[in-house]
Image (cartoon, coloured by chain):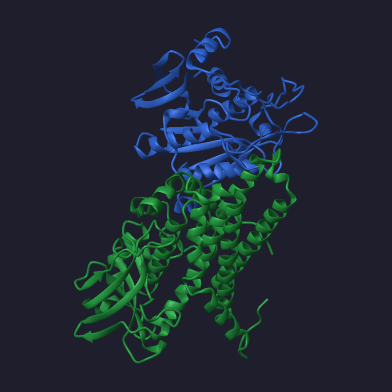
Chain colours: A green, B blue
Amino acid sequence: MNFNLSQDQQMFAETAKQFADQELAPHAARWDQEHIFPKDVMAQAGELGFCAIYAPEEAGGLGLSRLDAAIIFEQLAGGCTATTAMLTIHNMATWMVATWGTSTVVEQWCPTLTTGQQLASYCLTEPGSGSDAASLTTSAKRDGDDYVINGSKMFISGAGETDLLVVMVRTGGAGPKGISAIAVPADSQGIHYGKAEEKLGWNAQPTRLVTFENVRVPVANLLGEEGQGFSMAMKGLDGGRINIATCSVGTAQAALDAAKEYMLERQQFGRPLAQFQALQFKLADMATELVAARQMIRLAAFKLDQDDSEKTVYCAMAKRFATDVGFTVCDQALQIFGGYGYIKEYPLERYFRDVRVHQILEGTNEIMRVIIARRLLDEACGEIT
Amino acid sequence: MKILVPIKRVVDYNVKVRVKSDNTDVDLSNLKMSINPFCEIAVEEAVRLKEAGVASEVVVVSVGDKACQEQIRTALALGADRGIQVDTDQKPLPLSIAKLLHKVVEQEDPSIVLLGKQTIDGDNNQTGQMLAALAGMGQGTFASELKIDGDKALVTREVDGGLVTVALSLPAVVTTDLRLNEPRYASLPNIMKAKRKPITVTTPEELGVTIESTVEVLKVESPASRSAGVMVDSVEQLIEKLKTEAKVI
């Protein structure tokens, strides 16, 4: 067993870190403050390969592993959490289109999605269907060579700015087996976008309600087969959970680094904060838990890459643990900064606001516990170690 | 047209270096190492010349132990075509490096040797000049602009009085300054492609060069720490002090 990154992974991380330091971090505060969605920077990220890290090579992706992606996203998140989170959502949606799209859809969309010239949103949650995703009601009815879509999707990241929507719809009866996935051009007639939600964090990307009113898309836009949608959504979410967990760890690492520097510089009572043992212990715990969270994510990513039978449990565990640790570390780093942590001149309050939502989306951390416990108590459950 | 780009593995420019407790050297253990920034600019310029159709091949060469292959890989990921490592555990000084590079130049026969004006570890600023003398090639140092015009290289140099442009007959040695270009990021696909590009390994013995140490390091010390400043009461007082004490105006 070798815990070191491969030479390729080190170089991927290095490129991501340079990009984060030079193209994301210097602008992140302004994007947050002014609610700017930096599409030009996303396109620049696309030129470097960050928009289709694990999408298959046949469709223009890089065909890298989830572990590689986790290593890359972690570095990017240290520069701007919200932009990186959107980039991970785009990667997930692009992977779904590239993997399950018909040749028509792949040829039409993948060249621009994989390079970041166009962006994709992922639409699962509905106003009345959050944690209970299988109860979604947005319908797609077959009409000749088209599907006709009706319903609403809630909290859609990037909506109104992105070009393609990967939408989970009901084509069959009640329950998960009646759900299908469809790629819907974002400018299709009959799509209405709600106002940009006012949020605690993640302000560098808009979040909107998307309403579908008799939206027609060709049958060729169906991803996979009818009825496969829910299992696709769940497969997508395994990776999505790893991605969002890395966004927490990358942000928390930036918070920890800032707190460490601050402890060495800031003097009170005639000595640097770094000489106060209570703060030393706090810093030690933050670093320890962050290492644990990072390694747990990498383990889950590895299990996903191996298609381990219990991969979903590992992904849920990593998501729950790393997003909780990430939030705590950002909170404590803010505390070390005192009043300076609370004002916007320093990035600590933004880190704190941005990672909070990671405990909610891609399945709440309560749902993660449901997934873990349900599987553990199932007789068919494999070994979880 | 072939371009040879000598590069060096150095401590990363973001790292705060510490002096070893026995004052023999700086402590490089566990520190992040990178391609020297001036060398990276040289790689970028060579790759741009290739992309512009001026150059046909970009070869990078580095002198050092196996670890410097990391920096060769980085250069390959930025767009160089192949690498040469001159394998040695010693830390050769500029004259020895120039002698080694001279032999590589004889083997490779490049039209341009494009290298950093100095490395950020030794800050010697000698290797390019020494190589030009040994190889009998013209030199354009501290380049902020490089144009190839037929069999001539037009090099705009940054000198104390401003800019000077020299025309060099090829083959020539050109050393890069900071403003020549802004290096690109290595893209993920290019990092993956770099793995398949060849790196050949040679040795000082094979090149027929003996690495000599002509300089003896007596002691390595940290710079004196900055002493506390003085608060002045007015602009007039500041100007007075700049005139009479600092004597800078």
Residue B214, image quadrant? top right
Who's the residue at 68% across and 61% down the image?
Answer: A2
Horizontal and vertical percent position of residue B89? 71, 36
Horizontal and vertical percent position of residue A108? 27, 66
Q: Residue at the front extreme?
A: B233
A72 lies left or right of A146: right
Who's the residue at 34% across and 37% down the image?
Answer: B52
Residue B211, image quadrant? top right
A144 lies left or right of A109: left
Q: Is residue B173 above or below residue A35?
A: above
Of A249 and B215, the residue lying toward us: A249
| Quadrant in which the C terminus of chain A is drawn | bottom right
Horizontal and vertical percent position of residue B141? 48, 21
Horizontal and vertical percent position of residue B242? 53, 12
Who's the residue at 58% across and 67% down the image?
Answer: A324
Q: Is residue B245 above or below residue A380?
A: above
Q: Is residue B102 above or below residue A138?
A: above
Q: Is residue A7 visible?
A: no
